Amino acid sequence: MKKIVQNVLIRALCLMALGVLLLVFSRDFSEWAVRVSGLLFILPGCVSLVSFFRRDPEGNRVMLYPVIGLGSILFGLVLIVWPELFVQPLCYILLAVLLLAAATQCYTLWDIRRNGLPLHGALFLAPLAQLVLAGVVLFVALEEKDNTLSNILLGIGFLIYALVELWSLVWVRKSRVSSASGAVVQHD
């Protein structure tokens, strides 16, 4: 149970941080995210190329396929130099993450209710709001040249997800502690 709580907490905090970044830096977030991922492709490529020239203790070369390392470096350079080529795919990836988060949250809320903890029906509006935001991003915001609106909407969706996950985590823990102490818990 402790591992599940940790996973939910880490997932909620990561998506909250992503949502805040998308809201605060909505104009430049996509470009910088692509550039950072380009840097993350360059680093293992450099390690692979440097390791190619390494020799084991017997003097034989260690084969780590320098072509893959060189390809990783070149792809990282393309991401850094021309980030606008990959901004749109990044928005689609973030959109897919939001859709998966909404589906996961809907299932989590249903599972909490199925296990006997009463939840208000309005709480199920949060995943619905995330799906509506995802639909608006998909059909309206991604058509714009500037992706500021799509970043703002995705950031709001991620924040809704994170807040509901944190609330449900506290709710479940509070309900379990109350039921373990033998107190009668009455939820509205």
Image (cartoon, rainbow, N blue to C red):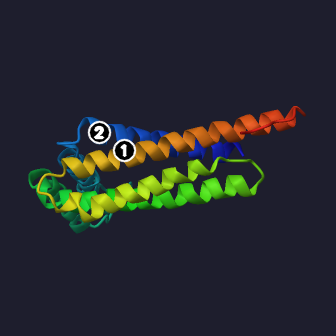
Residue furthest right in the image: 182
In the rendered view, tell whether residue 8 sits above or below residue 177: below
Identify the residue at image location x=64%, y=36%.
170
At x 87%, y 35%, the residue is 184
Q: Which residue is mark 2?
A: 23
Q: Amino acid at mark 2?
A: Leu
Q: Which mark is residue 22?
A: none
In the image, what residue occupies the spot 56% across and 53% down? 124
Give the side of residue 18 with respect to residue 113, left or right. Answer: left
Front one among 47 and 99: 99
| Few, some or many residues within 10 Å of mark 2 (<14, 14–19, 20+) | many
Q: Report x, y in % for residue 105.
A: 55, 54
Q: Left or right: where does residue 69 sit relative to residue 172? A: left
The residue beneath circle 1 is: 156
Q: Would residue 52 be seen by someone viewing this image from the given angle? A: no
**What SS does tag 2 mark?**
helix
